[in-house]
Amino acid sequence: MINAATANNAMAEPTEFPVAQVPRVNIHTFCDNQQTAETLQSAAMDRRMARAHVTIQLGGILAAVQVYQTQPTPNVLVVESHSSREGILLELGQLAQVCQPTTKVIVIGHLNDVILYRELIRQGVSEYLVAPIGQMQLIETIASLFQDPKAKPLGRIIAFVGAKGGVGSSTIAHHIAWAMSNNFGLETVITDLDLAFGTAGLNFNQDASGGMLDALGQPDRIDATLLDRMLTKLGDKLSLLNGPGGVDRDVSIDASAIETILSVIRNSVPSVIVDVPNMWAPWIKHTLLNADEVVITSTPELASLRNTKNIIDLLKVSRTNDEAPRLILNQVGMPKRPEIPAAEFAKAVGIAPSLVIPHDPQSFGAAQSNGQMLFEVAPKSKSAELLAAFTQVLLGTDKGGKVAKSGLSSLFQKFPTLRKK
Ligand SMILES: Nc1ncnc2c1ncn2[C@@H]1O[C@H](COP(=O)(O)OP(=O)(O)OP(=O)(O)O)[C@@H](O)[C@H]1O
Ligand SMILES: [Mg+2]
């Protein structure tokens, strides 16, 4: 079971910070090598390249020179050359005759040559990459061409989804958000996408403000200032984009509206916790496929197992450059309920749970009825300890091995680091 997850993780090339979406631009590539062409082909399928229009041709820089005798150059031109330093400079000299000044050129070469690199940058080439290139390396390079170099690094979008209704996904998402902001000083925003039945407001003892509804009504107008007005402050570093929490409004949700809202938030804060309702719709699928990380909460029952497996399989197939989702088994040990043992569950879904939380109605019930977190009402409970430890693992800050000491480490998969503010 661990092997399947590890194998998937091995395919991902984690980057330190999330990589931005490449905008709606034309990218033409001229490779000189089959391996590079295959890497480009796979990179073009990545979720971060979904908006870009990519074409791949063989023939290197000289083929590009031919093509652009008769047509304008695209927004981004990626060209590969096997030539020597002098050869590449000569070929690029010819390309310069036909290349529009607005076209951003990325050169893939086979020489690890600093002098060549400096000369290319001096001549206006946007980036020089040494083959063999990685998919994420290329995507990150292209994405960075369209970003303000002075902008803050992008925040990480972590989507929490339940494998079945009522498994505790929202409760866990809220606790993780609280711990990130309170224990780690990380500016965090919770977005409650469960417009009718969301519980984020209740769990933090807040009135439903409906900021999310306002945001969905005008996604293209949203900027950091407008967003700030829509957020409900929950703490020094924790805010909520809340649903209206009612059934009197018919709202049709558009996947791109959610994406726009989340991208504005991630430009302002390092951590965006998305509370995704347990249902299936195009916008839910889109939100999960485009999150930086997905946490699936499940209970040890058959229906949960089936749904967990389906979600994991979908994510693995569609997100080849991302870490596998993390799995939390919750409410384990509920009296009188037949349960699937964690090891069998893990084997069936192909991922070991990162966290197993016991059925703990006393602590969770107290937290819910007080509109507070377990960390406040039952800080010494095992559940509070586990949630705090999991937050630390999600953030990559378990340096002292606290989690290992709590006996959880064997269950954890490899976790990428998350930026700490
Ligand atoms: N480990 C646990 N032990 C006992 N109760 C729990 C546990 N985890 C969550 N709960 C309780 O389960 C209930 C459902 O939790 P929650 O609303 O977070 O689930 P959900 O998966 O988001 O449900 P929905 O499908 O409605 O969105 C809440 O009352 C919560 O306090
Ligand atoms: Mg929920």
Image: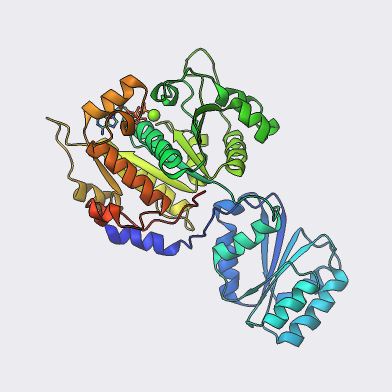
- Residue 15 in picture, x, y percent from top left: 52, 60
Residue at (23% x, 50% y) in the render: 406
Asked if one can make out residue 329 in the rendered structure from this viewpoint, the answer is no
Does residue 362 lie above or below 389 as drawn?
above
Does residue 303 lie above or below 81 as drawn?
above
- Residue 387 in picture, x, y percent from top left: 32, 41
Q: Quadrant of residue 183?
A: top left
Is 15 positioned to the left or the right of 198 in the image? Answer: right
| Residue at the extreme top | 248
Residues 285 and 415: in front is 415
Is 75 positioned to the left or the right of 349 in the image? Answer: right
Residue at (62% x, 26% y) in the render: 229
Residue at (56% x, 68% y) in the render: 39
Does residue 74 lie above or below 368 as drawn?
below
- Residue 11 in picture, x, y percent from top left: 44, 63
> For the N terminus, which image quadrant?
bottom left
Q: Quadrant of residue 417?
A: bottom left
- Residue 223 in picture, x, y percent from top left: 68, 35
